[in-house]
Image (cartoon, rainbow, N blue to C red):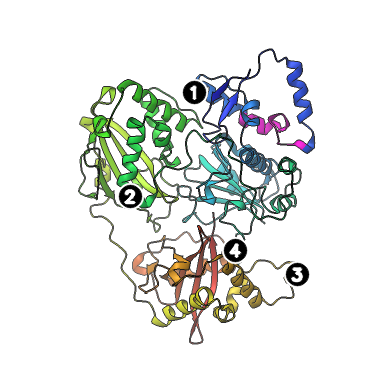
């Protein structure tokens, strides 16, 4: 009889349980099962059919898992028992990495993309209730030379920093000439988010083809397998036989059956952002010490917090191995509970603590007996994060909203220990992005060096009195397009200069005029946008991410943002300029000139989900403001 061992991997996502081998199984039987599973048709269906490089990643993960937990899990049974979407995701992403060769400008071999991966942290399959940019992807640790190799390769290019999606992973590399394309996102050039984009990320396709939807990265959905075959041949659709029917006629892959095998640690916390930061901080502590379910508390940890937790482990004489951060944290929280016994309320275990810097302000807190809660200016919060973003331009400052909580332990070994947690919004949840734990006599919410970094919290940017005719024309465009659904009138706002933003036409499109192609693109997403009473019911504004972009006051600011763009920055936004090297000189606010260009930014509301962010650049042509460029901000 097989014995089931609970497991929190692969990186808390891949496995829900691992079956230990049946007693008496002989090596001959194991070899026979491997031979039976290794036919090309079943490639990736089972552990035995994986390639050596794929097995190596899994073997290494299970070795680290066993070392952390004292278990005796096996890679074969762990993989074979994983959910379907987890196996297809691992198979599809690693297969793409295996078959992507890298070369430098002289054509010299730089290895394969998979050679840049050092260790596996997490495999995210279909995760109910999470955004598309948090499903069907791998989280990995990269080798120290990985980003230099990517930058030197002819196959990848450094894309614009992620600002709307992939929160916490701004550095972006994409495989050229997609879709399909590999996207790699990181913060510290160590941990990275890896997925395959099967849908176009260009306008107009990205606005209606499901790029933001999880099906963008799910190899099982629609014709994604056929799309990838044109680039990475050899991945057989073994899952189609298991489902019993073809998926080619459906945009979405079928939902996984509820097998009862759920993630030990949820993908996201119980409470959402609109429940309040104080409620989220309380739920984190309550789940830990009162409910004695620290797995639900660990769900509040952002991957941005991992380096902090690794440092805390080292201070305690423990080395946390790659991929084991959340698991090690849960084990530590379980030990804390075991040492303190039954706790009826959070304030029995913790009390508010923290020295205050003049730069932080207390905010509404319904749990003042448990922790202190303050708002932290973005520039100070960035300095508090565990890892700084490499080579961040001085003109680009974070516009994230940060909070900090501080509490002191009252029982056992935690007595007089002070925890300081930094919180930021990720995917409509409040998550912990940095952690410090110190002795009470040394604790301060903001260290002394941070207090000198900013004497005054950053003020809100001054509103810009934009050209009233620009505001009028931009508003009219959205009214004709989304509110009145008259794309014939809406497309008249497109300048001929914007035609360079269109993707290379297919054979069937070569005879279609560019303006007609744009109009067709505007028409397609409208069927997914429920009719509302106002523009703000059908669209959502996207806010600025650069301090030099000045917001313009206008009555439809909830539906779409209008921002004045410095004349000096506009060229880099034009489509024909985007693949040229960026200028390294930093524009000083005092030198910025405004009035020639405006940027509008919005997302369409597709019922329960939103479209990618659509950014549109406007300038004046013959007494009318027109669209001269656009960009789609995609996961």
The answer to whether mark 1 and mark 3 are in CB contact below 8 A is: no
Query: Which numbered disc flags the more N-terminal residue, 4 or 3?
Result: 4
Which residue, given by chain and number where applicable, does mark 2 sit on? 276
> Pointer 1 and pointer 4: residues touching (CB < 8 Å)?
no
Give the class, few, some or many, for how many residues have Cα within 10 Å of label 3's Cα (few <14, many ≥20): few
Alpha carbon distance from label 2 to label 4? 32 Å
Tell me the CA gap for discs 1 and 2.
35 Å
Can you give x and y, in whole percent of width and height, for residue 61 in the image?
57, 29
The range drawn in magenta is 42-58
Badge 2 density bin: few <14, some 14–19, many ≥20, Cα 10 Å? some
Q: Residues within 10 Å of mark 4 (few under 14, many from 20)?
A: many
- Frontmost of labels 2 and 3 is 2
Asked if residue 55 lies in the magenta stretch, the reply is yes
Quadrant where the N terminus is found in the figure: top right
Q: Residue at x 23, y 50 (%)?
A: 359
The numbered mark at residue 335 is none
Disc number lying in front (1 or 2) = 2
Name the spot of residue 46 as percent of width and height, x first: 70, 32
Under tag 2, what secondary structure?
loop
Chain-order first, disc 2 or disc 4: 4
The answer to which of marks 2 and 3 sits earlier in the sequence is 2
Q: Which residue is mark 3?
A: 508
Could you tell me how far apart the alpha carbons at marks 2 and 3 are, in whole angstroms? 51 Å
Q: Which residue is mark 1?
A: 68
Which label is found at residue 208? 4
User: Splitting the image into 4 quarters, where does residue 552 fall?
Assistant: bottom left
């Amino acid at each position: 009889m097989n014995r089931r061992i609970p497991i929190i991997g692969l990186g808390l996502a891949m496995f829900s349980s691992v079956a230990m081998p049946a007693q008496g199984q002989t090596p001959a039987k194991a070899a026979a099962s491997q031979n039976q599973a290794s036919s090309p048709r079943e490639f990736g269906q089972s552990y035995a059919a994986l390639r050596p490089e794929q097995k190596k990643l899994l073997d290494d993960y299970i070795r680290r898992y066993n070392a952390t937990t004292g278990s005796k899990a096996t890679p074969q049974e762990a993989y074979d028992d994983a959910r379907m979407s987890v196996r297809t995701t691992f198979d599809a992403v690693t297969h793409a990495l295996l078959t992507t060769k890298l070369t430098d400008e002289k054509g010299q071999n730089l290895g394969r993309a998979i050679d840049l991966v050092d260790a596996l942290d997490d495999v995210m399959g279909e995760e109910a209730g999470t955004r598309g940019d948090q499903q069907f992807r791998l989280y990995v640790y990269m080798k120290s030379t990985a980003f230099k190799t990517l930058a030197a390769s002819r196959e990848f290019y450094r894309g614009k920093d992620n600002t709307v999606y992939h929160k916490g992973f701004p550095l972006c590399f994409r495989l050229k000439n997609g879709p399909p394309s590999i996207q790699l996102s990181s913060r510290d050039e160590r941990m990275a988010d890896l997925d395959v984009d099967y849908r176009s990320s260009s306008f107009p396709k990205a606005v209606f083809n499901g790029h933001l939807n999880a099906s963008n990265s799910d190899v099982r959905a629609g014709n994604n397998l056929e799309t990838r075959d044109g680039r990475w041949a050899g991945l057989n659709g073994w899952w189609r036989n298991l489902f019993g029917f073809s998926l080619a006629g459906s945009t979405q892959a079928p939902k996984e059956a509820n097998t009862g095998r759920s993630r030990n640690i949820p993908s996201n916390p119980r409470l959402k952002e609109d429940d309040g930061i104080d409620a989220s901080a309380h739920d984190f502590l309550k789940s830990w010490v009162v409910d004695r379910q620290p797995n639900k508390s660990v769900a509040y940890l952002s991957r941005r917090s991992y380096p902090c937790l690794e440092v805390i482990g080292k201070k305690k004489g423990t080395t946390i191995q790659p991929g084991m951060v959340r698991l090690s944290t849960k084990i530590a929280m379980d030990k804390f509970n075991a040492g303190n016994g039954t706790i009826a309320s959070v304030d029995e275990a913790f009390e508010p603590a923290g020295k205050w810097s003049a730069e932080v302000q207390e905010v509404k807190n319904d749990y003042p007996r448990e922790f202190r809660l303050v708002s932290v200016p973005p520039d100070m919060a960035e300095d508090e994060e565990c890892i700084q973003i490499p080579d961040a331009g001085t003109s680009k400052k974070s516009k994230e909203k940060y909070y900090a909580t501080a509490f002191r332990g009252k029982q056992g070994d935690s007595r007089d220990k002070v925890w300081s947690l930094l919180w930021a919004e990720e995917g409509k949840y409040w998550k912990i992005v940095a952690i410090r734990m110190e002795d009470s006599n040394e604790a301060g919410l903001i260290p002394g060096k941070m207090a000198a970094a900013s004497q005054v919290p950053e003020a809100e940017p001054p509103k810009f009195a934009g050209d009233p005719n620009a505001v009028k024309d931009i508003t009219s465009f959205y009214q004709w397009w989304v509110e009145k659904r008259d794309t014939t009138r809406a497309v008249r706002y497109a300048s001929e200069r914007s035609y360079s933003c269109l993707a290379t036409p297919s054979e069937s499109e070569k005879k279609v005029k560019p303006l007609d192609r744009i109009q067709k693109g505007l028409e397609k997403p409208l069927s997914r946008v429920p009719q509302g009473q106002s523009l703000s019911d059908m669209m959502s504004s996207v806010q600025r991410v650069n301090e030099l972009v000045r917001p313009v006051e206008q009555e439809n600011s909830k539906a779409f943002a209008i921002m004045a763009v410095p004349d000096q920055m506009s060229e880099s936004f034009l489509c024909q300029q985007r693949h040229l090297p960026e200028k390294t000189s930093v524009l000083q606010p005092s030198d910025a000139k405004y009035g020639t260009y405006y940027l509008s930014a919005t997302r369409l509301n597709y019922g329960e989900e939103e479209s990618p962010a659509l950014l549109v650049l406007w300038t004046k042509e013959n007494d009318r403001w027109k669209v001269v460029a656009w960009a789609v901000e995609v996961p």
